[in-house]
Amino acid sequence: MQLIARNGSEYIRAYLETAESWTRVQGLSKSGKLLMCCCDHPAKATRSPRGLRHFAHMPGSACSVGSQESEAHLRLKIEALTVAHELGFDAIAEYDRGTIRPDVEVVQRGTKKNVAIEIQLSRQTGYTTNERTSARAAQNLDTVWFFGNKRDFDDAPKDQRHVYPVRLPSGDIEFQIDVLRKKLSAFLRGVIVFDDLSNLAKVPFTVIGYDFPCGGCGRDWYRTSYAGLYPNRIRGDLHPVAVPLASLGDPAEALKTLAERTGKATGRVAPGGMGLLCPHCGTAPEAEFITPEVALRAPARNISGHRDMRRFSGLKPGWWWRRNPVADEHWSDAEWAAVIEQGINAIKTERQRIAREKRLAEERRRMEAERAEAIRSATAAELSLLTEMLDPHLGAPGTQAWLDRANDILGEKTPRAVVQQHVWASHSLPPVAHSAATALAIRMLDGSERLTEEQCGLPKKNLKQLRKSRRQTTASPASSSSLKRAWEGLCRLMFG
């Protein structure tokens, strides 16, 4: 099936003929004046079973051009011609260029390149596709391929400006026609374009930051964790993206430029380029509470510069639907300030909690040290008292032997062990009965109750009272009475 034949120097296009003019063409065919363009063999003006007008070789021809063309291929070819003509393009079917004969050739006025439209419904290897594409490129033709086979489409190059592959759905010819019309129309109107990503070499960016109170020295500095890039201002199908400042190259240079422009103290790059430090004291800040999504909503500032986004965009050169650049959305200054205030307040609260736990831990360590010293002193004092009492009667060696010998009156324990247990019991923590201040301190430690300034003084006052009572307990008559009973028991054992 072919769509063009000639009558001398007149070229007759079957897809442009009306019912009346087709009658004249059929007369030329019967008279033998109508010739096929491919081989000058007499042409027959005929119709397909669906009524499509076309030309075929008269019997006796050895030429096979167009002999294997299906009616679906013919309908798609006619649709491509129709779309081009509707958009005001000059288009011709089966134009013979010697070594190639594109299904449809579209003349792009104002450019030096025409477009070859090829409809490939049968299987074709990737090698053949590349060979045919190269042959058309050699004659200064870009090629739009419409593949009916998925494998052919997959094998076709997607990253070359001179070839645009399109996958036609299998099955319904009407659906295929709709897809061809939509894609070809978009291509010819410039809605689908090839992007080699060169326009992403200079994407505008701005440094996103906020005033941050240092946890070390307490001074503010301008914390900048992210840079916002706005490729949406170049391609409407792309979205703004927040990236770590270090990913833009030398962060120190960007921070220096920012400091010069804003007059603020910006962060100092940490060793190895991992994060920022306070420029005043070198303290590392807490984890960033601003997420990339929130950072992009920061109020629009002056553009800090331009960066090449191609290496981390994840995009490849290819064909895309053109969309006009779109504006990025930002919060107002008040909304941004509220977000920053909330995050910084959370950090300050956490700092206070950590400091409170640190103070309590230090107080516990100090109290334990005092308790250990008090136990050591009290134990030494009571053992010294025992020694002073017994040495005149038992002698120093006998006293030491008695202190370290188990005594049935003492429950098979040595006097030394009894003294140690008594002292430990007298200094045990926490007390058996909690005072109101001690109970309050326990609730303070687990964070279940927030203290007033008046309540904050109670634990300290209670601690003084507790120490005083322990000193009194250590020197109390109870200790002397236990020694007296032990002495009386010893005398009974030794002297009857």
Image (spheres, helix red, strand yellow):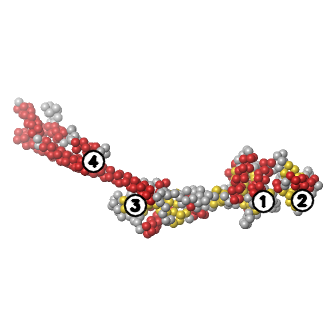
Count of number-bearing discs = 4
- Residue to which mark 2 is pinned: 7
- Residue 211, numbered circle: 3
Alpha-carbon span between mark 4 and mark 1? 87 Å
Q: Is residue 245 visible?
A: no
What residue is at 56 percent from the left and 61 percent from the top? 233
Left or right for 149, reference 295? right
Disc 3 crowd, CA 10 A, few/some/many (<14, 14-19, 20+): some
Alpha-carbon span between mark 3 and mark 1? 64 Å
Alpha-carbon span between mark 2 and mark 1? 20 Å
Alpha-carbon span between mark 3 and mark 2? 83 Å
What residue is at 88 percent from the left and 53 percent from the top? 20
Q: Is residue 198 visible?
A: yes
Give coordinates of residue 119: x percent, y percent: 75, 53
Which quadrant would residue 407 be assigned to in this image?
A: top left
Residue nearer the viewer, 296 or 154: 296
Secondary structure under the numbered disc 2 in the rendered image = strand
Which quadrant would residue 326 be assigned to in this image?
A: bottom right
> Which is nearer the N-term, disc 3 or disc 2?
2
- Marks 3,4: beta carbons within 8 A: no
- Residue 451, numbered circle: 4
Secondary structure under the numbered disc 3 in the rendered image = strand
- Marks 2,1: beta carbons within 8 A: no
The residue type indicated by label 4 comes to Leu
Disc 2 crowd, CA 10 A, few/some/many (<14, 14-19, 20+): some
The residue type indicated by label 1 comes to Ala
> Which is nearer the N-term, disc 4 or disc 1?
1
- Residue to which mark 1 is pinned: 91
